[in-house]
């Protein structure tokens, strides 16, 4: 077990969750409109990409953030709840 690597991973996860929560505060405003149009608007997609959410499973050597896969459902749930 590499304590330094584990601490770094935990920091990356916490940063991603904080960015997700920040994004969620903005998504709720557009959620209904996205639902009506049956698509995600480009601004939302840009914000998701900018928050690093799309890089969760990408290895660091390829520019990703390589977090635990257990974080995927948590991020998905938070994003989904933002649009309720």
Image: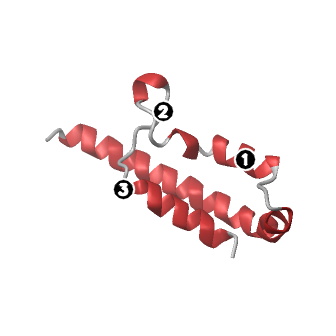
Tell which circle, 1 or 3, labels the residue nearer the N-terminal end.
1
Give how far apart the Cα atoms at labels 2 and 3 are.
Answer: 16 Å
* Labelled pair 1, 3 in contact (Cβ < 8 Å): no
Q: Classify 82 as above or below 7.
A: below
Which residue sits at x=81%, y=65%? 30
Which residue sits at x=34%, y=44%? 9
Q: Which residue is mark 1?
A: 45
Instruction: Report x, y in % for residue 10.
Output: 34, 50
Tell which circle, 2 or 1, labels the residue nearer the N-terminal end.
1
| Residue 46, quarter of the rendered image | top right
Q: Which residue is mark 2?
A: 64
Q: Classify 52 as above or below 76.
A: above
Tell which circle, 2 or 3, labels the residue nearer the N-terminal end.
2
Q: Quadrant of the C terminus?
A: bottom right
Neighbor class of circle 2 (other Cα within 10 Å; few <14, some 14-19, many 20+) is some
Neighbor class of circle 1 (other Cα within 10 Å; few <14, some 14-19, many 20+) is few
Instruction: Report x, y in % for residue 57.
Output: 44, 40
- Looking at the image, the residue that sits furthest to the front is 38
Tell me: 42 left or right of 83: right
- Looking at the image, the residue that sits furthest to the left is 1
Q: Which residue is mark 3?
A: 70
| Residue 31, quarter of the rendered image | bottom right
Neighbor class of circle 3 (other Cα within 10 Å; few <14, some 14-19, many 20+) is few
- Looking at the image, the residue that sits furthest to the bottom is 84
In-front residue for pair 32/1: 32
Which residue sits at x=48%, y=50%? 15
Give how far apart the Cα atoms at labels 2 and 1 are.
Answer: 17 Å
Q: Secondary structure at mark 1?
A: helix
Tell me: 8 left or right of 76: left
Instruction: Report x, y in % for residue 22.
Output: 63, 59
């Amino acid at each position: 077990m590499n304590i330094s690597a584990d601490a770094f991973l935990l920091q990356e996860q916490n940063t991603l969750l904080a960015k997700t929560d920040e994004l969620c505060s903005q998504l709720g405003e557009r959620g209904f409109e996205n639902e009506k149009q049956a698509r995600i608007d480009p601004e939302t997609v840009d914000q998701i990409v900018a928050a690093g959410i799309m890089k969760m499973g990408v290895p660091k050597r390829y520019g990703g953030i390589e977090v635990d896969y257990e974080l995927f459902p948590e991020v998905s749930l938070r994003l989904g709840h933002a649009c309720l």
